[in-house]
Image (cartoon, grey):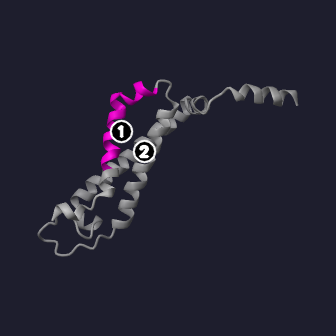
């Protein structure tokens, strides 16, 4: 009983940020997250390149169509946009988590890595709120 009380008293002074830092700043967690992020990034880049070569497969009404293609069916439209949104939301949440566990958050937010993260995520969030067909036509 005394050990439990002492443990609880020791944990009362620990903030949420310190708890996250303790759990996530381990080498195996960092390496696992980096490998997963690299894998997801490479897969998404390959899908983006694939989409640029076969717009009709990914969109029913693509921005451009090759002349020999008369009608686009957009077979992969549903899973493609779902995958893009899920991936961007994952990277946004991962970025927020990294900001929370930083000791010096302002310094981290003004780093080059943070600017790249922000400039790759914010355009998607803006594009989701704008009707693309209104300015393409």
Is 71 positioned to the left or the right of 115 in the image? left
- Crowdedness near tag 2: few (<14), some (14–19) or many (≥20) residues, C-alpha within 10 Å: some
Q: Residue furthest right?
A: 1
Task: Name the secondary structure under disc 1.
Answer: helix
Q: Which mark is residue 8?
A: none
Dots 1, 2 in contact, CB < 8 A: yes
Q: Residue at x 14, y 66 (%)?
A: 66
Quick one: 3 or 64, which is closer to the camera? 3
Measure the alpha-carbon separation of dots 1 and 2: 8 Å
Label 2 belongs to which residue?
A: 91
Quick one: 99 or 66, which is closer to the camera? 99
Label 1 belongs to which residue?
A: 117
Q: Residue furthest left?
A: 67
Residue 121 horizontal/vertical position (percent): 35, 45
Q: Does residue 31 belong to the magenta stretch?
A: no
The quadrant of the image that shows the C terminus is bottom left
Q: Residue at x 68, y 26 (%)?
A: 13
- 82 to 111, vertically: above or below: below
Task: Please report the bounds of the magenta region as a residue range.
Answer: 105-124
Residue 84 horizontal/vertical position (percent): 37, 55
- Crowdedness near tag 1: few (<14), some (14–19) or many (≥20) residues, C-alpha within 10 Å: some
Q: Is residue 35 visible?
A: no
- 74 to 33, vertically: above or below: below
Task: Determine which quarter of the picture holds residue 78.
Answer: bottom left
Task: Determine which quarter of the picture holds residue 18.
Answer: top right
Task: Name the secondary structure under disc 2.
Answer: helix
Q: Does residue 112 belong to the magenta stretch?
A: yes
Q: Residue at x 39, y 30 (%)?
A: 109
Residue 37 horizontal/vertical position (percent): 43, 42
Q: Main secondary structure of the magenta part?
A: helix
Task: Determine which quarter of the picture holds residue 62.
Answer: bottom left
Residue 72 horizontal/vertical position (percent): 23, 72
């Amino acid at each position: 009983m005394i050990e439990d009380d002492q443990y609880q008293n020791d944990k009362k002074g620990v903030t949420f940020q310190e708890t996250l830092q303790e759990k996530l700043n381990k080498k195996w967690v960092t390496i696992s997250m980096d490998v997963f992020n690299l894998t997801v990034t490479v897969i998404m880049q390959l899908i983006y390149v694939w989409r640029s070569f076969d717009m009709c497969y990914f969109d029913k009404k693509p921005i451009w169509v090759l002349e020999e293609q008369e009608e686009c069916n957009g077979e992969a439209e549903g899973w493609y946009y779902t995958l893009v949104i899920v991936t961007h939301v994952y990277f946004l949440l991962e970025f927020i988590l990294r900001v929370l566990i930083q000791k010096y958050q302002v310094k981290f937010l003004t780093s080059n890595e943070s600017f790249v993260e922000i400039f790759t995520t914010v355009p998607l969030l803006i594009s989701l709120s704008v009707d693309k067909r209104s300015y393409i036509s």
